[in-house]
Image: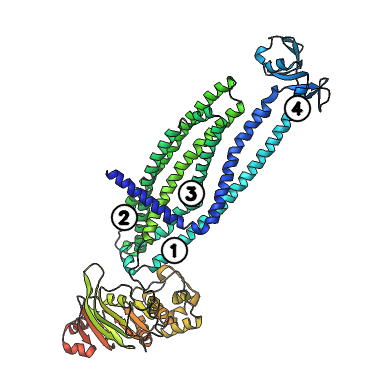
Amino acid sequence: MAKIVEEKIETKVSYNLTKRLYQYIKPYKTSLIIGIILVLAISAMELLKPMLIGSAIDDYIEKYDKIYGICDNSDLYFKGHYLTVTNIEDCDRFATIVLYQDEYYFFDDLDHNSSIMIHDSDINDFSYDDTLYYKQYSSIRLSSDDLKILRNDDIRGIRVIAVIYVIVLIANAFCNFLQTYVLQKMGQNIIYNIRQQLFDHVNSLPLRFFDTHPIGQVVTRITNDVEALNEMYSRILIRLFQSAVKIIGLVIVMLSIDLKMALYCFIMVPFIGLLTYIFKNISRRVSRVIRTRISILNTFLSENISGMRLIQIFTNEQRKYEEFKDKNTKLFKANLYRLLVNASFRPIIYFIAQIGLAIVLYNGAKDVIGGYLTIGTLYIFTNYISNLYEPIQDMAEQFSTLQNAYASSEKIFRLLDETNDIVEKTDPVILDNIEGNIEFKHVWFAYENDDYVLKDVSFTIEKGKKVAFVGATGAGKTSILSLIGRYYDIQKGQILVDGHDIKDLSIKQLRKAIGMVLQDVFVFNGTIYDNITLLDDISKEKVIESAKFTNADHFIEKLPNKYEEVMSERGSTLSMGQRQLLSFARTLAHDPKILVMDEATANIDSETELLIQDALEKMMTNKTTIMVAHRLSTIQHADKIIVMHKGRIVEMGNHQELLALNGMYKKLYDLQLYA
């Protein structure tokens, strides 16, 4: 019962996947229709080629024993006779060719009945002077030149079939090229759209998603898994259709030619069908395992290559090597198992196909000897039976790739189904200008369930004021910064910007008004200029002005290519202080109304700190500024300092007021002062 339920669920999943995958084909239905038409044309030509050769064998090559009429007027003159193969009913005397012991003999002056009855087995077994005798009729042995004269029509017919065959080959090659180009182009367009959709969707996901999903896993979805779909859209689907059309066409043609021979061809088909079904199910399970293990391996690589400095600092290379070896071995074994399944399937199918061919040859040869079947027809069936098993075998192997694509699509759609719980209203409030007034009203916030990081937090920040948050690690300071830009949504309470609930505002306008400077500055691959503008439409003059204003030009002007200097990954060629100054220039260039700084001056050398402090003072002018700092010396100038403890506000005031309270702030200050 459980197995039946599982199969029903899997069938439903497959149906849903197929339905969703089809949605990407809809914009390219024209290309798909062209591909289907070309498949039908190619299949028809594949069926036609053996029939042309069979026709050449039966109608011309083996048609040496045709009846010639001897008449007074004809285009063919041979050995004193005018011969014709048309309108022979008007003739009184006849002639024919007989094959005897690998030699051709010409009998003439026959009556109609005797010419029909002559066979090499009826010929008297003696000859002299190149002459054979049949009853009262004598013959002459034919030379190759004689045969060319007598069989000129047959040669001409073979030549016509050869020309037709070549034309079919050329047309087939052209249709194959056109089909490949059209479908590959369609596949590439679909894959391009899926990648764009995935990246756009990932960009729209909230930070909560990236807190719980490894980056390597997301990268695998957009690269490896999408590439697996490329094969399906550009090759596999149309080849499955082509194989199905070919099988149906072969069955119809074989049944129409000779029912008995067709049934001989179908004897082994049930066995191949059963093997194909078993192979398909095994292949699906293996493909799912492989896609999962690729994702695990990519995640491991992403994390460990990013953390290589830490690995080497703690001499952890060997342990990481063993971990990688374990994951790599599991992937290797899964691929090896798939290879074993694939390698076993083709030889088994080939063996069964050869048995089927032997059955057809044996029974077909008996019918040829008995005169019930022509050699050309036997050739057609021996060719068709190979062509019949080949698409069945191809379909099974294509199912393997299809299952791989389905396994990838499951993971892709799982990512696309991730919802963004930061939902913007359909008609958000668009402010003429964000001033920078911020208010938290009884805010409760938890990253997971009811494990609240902020508990009933309330405060106000007037525009242009500087407010600092201090407290022990885990007090909730950084969470407040993330909530202002609505990177997370609160569970209870309200956050207001310029008197409007941020849930009513345009997310884009809100975030554009906030400039965030973090302790860990991320530098993208690209030039200094690109890292400041982030590819937004900002003039070079403004970029240079922002760099000078924030003192970032002190190190930029010393670089060989200045603002066009290309940065390595994560800006590893820059010092921590230089990266921080670069982030200041980036923030200022985007002209935010609200500055949010999380430990912006931590771990900076003294010389650079002077530049940073000077840049900060200039940046904070006429801007609402929110700071988080562990070093209290850096926030003493703040208009308001809010002390956090275990998610609650315990003290609030300026530096002097808080010292006078002789509370938690005073203790933190004394600890740092006398440390």
Identify the amino acid type marked 3: Leu
Element carrying mark 3: helix
Using a 10 Å C-alpha cutoff, classify the residue at mark 2 as few (fewer than 14 neighbours), some (14 to 19) or many (20 or more).
few
Q: Is residue 79 left or right of residue 182?
A: right
- Earlier in the chain: of badge 3 and badge 1, it is 1
The nearer-to-camera label among 4 and 3 is 4
For image coordinates 45% across by 37% down, the residue present is: 346
Identify the amino acid type marked 1: Gln
Quadrant of the drawing holding the C terminus: bottom left
- Earlier in the chain: of badge 4 and badge 3, it is 4
Residue toward you, 603 or 353: 353
- Earlier in the chain: of badge 2 and badge 1, it is 1
The nearer-to-camera label among 3 and 2 is 3
Where does residue 311 sit, x and y in percent of width and height?
A: 32, 61
Element carrying mark 2: helix
Q: Separation of disc 3 and disc 2 at Cα?
A: 45 Å
Residue matched to label 1: 197
Residue toward you, 639 or 571: 639
For image coordinates 49% across by 56% down, the residue present is: 25
Q: Is residue 195 left or right of residue 371?
A: left
Identify the amino acid type marked 4: Thr
Residue toward you, 563 or 285: 285
Residue matched to label 3: 237
Q: Taking 137 as reference, is 197 above or below it?
A: below
Answer whether residue 357 is visible to the viewer in this image: yes
Where does residue 178 sit, x and y in percent of width and height?
A: 59, 51
